[in-house]
Image: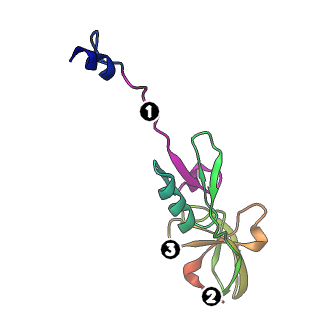
Amino acid sequence: MDHFKGILGTEGGASPSAPAETESWYRVRKTWADASSQKGAFKSLENAKKCADENPGCSVFDESGKAVYSSTAAFKPYLVQVSIPNLNIRKGPGTDHGKTGKYTGAGTFTIVEEADGEGASRWGLLKSYQEKRDGWISLDYAKRV
């Protein structure tokens, strides 16, 4: 039996310990720098990819910030019809962001990005505010056309 001890690594005392596995996490965000856009953190790459696919515009990043997967379902701008004259335009996606002091008025507008935020089921970024990303409307008051 002593010859098995050498094979099993028990000869001469304690068995050698296996190298510790490093735990890595995959983060699903719009960009690595925008931590507030994070939708989740996953140990499983497959679960992270599924989350990215469910959140258009998001990618999967490894712990170093390198994008390892981008959703194939990229966001496509679309038109909405606003029928109320006084829909507030906000500086960010949510009622916790300040108002710009402007309203959309009734009409048709292009939404170039969507986001979650307080006070609405979903927020949309108006195309005319795309550069500074400071013109968001509640999509609860807009009908997709």
In this figure, which residue is indicated by the disc labeled 1?
21
Confirm or deny contact between disc 2 and disc 3 (CB under 8 A). Answer: no
In this figure, which residue is indicated by the disc labeled 3?
121
Q: Nearer the viewer, mark 2 or mark 1?
A: 1
How far apart in space, not on screen, are marks 2 and 1 (Cα)?
57 Å
Task: Name the kind of residue labelled 3 in the image.
Answer: Ser
Determine the residue positioned at 63% across, 70% down.
73
Residue situated furthest top in the rendering: 12
Judged from the image, the secondary structure of the residue bearing numbered disc 3 is loop
**Label 2 or label 1, whichever comes before in sequence order:** 1
For the record, the magenta segment spans 17-38
Along the line of sight, which residue is nearer the eye, 33 or 88? Answer: 33
Viewed as shown, does residue 138 lie left or right of 106?
A: left
Judged from the image, the secondary structure of the residue bearing numbered disc 2 is loop
Q: Let me know if residue 30 is in the magenta part.
A: yes
When asked about the image quadrant of residue 80, the answer is: bottom right
**Label 2 or label 3, whichever comes before in sequence order:** 2
**Label 1 or label 3, whichever comes before in sequence order:** 1
In this figure, which residue is indicated by the disc labeled 2?
84
Q: Is residue 7 above or below residue 96?
A: above
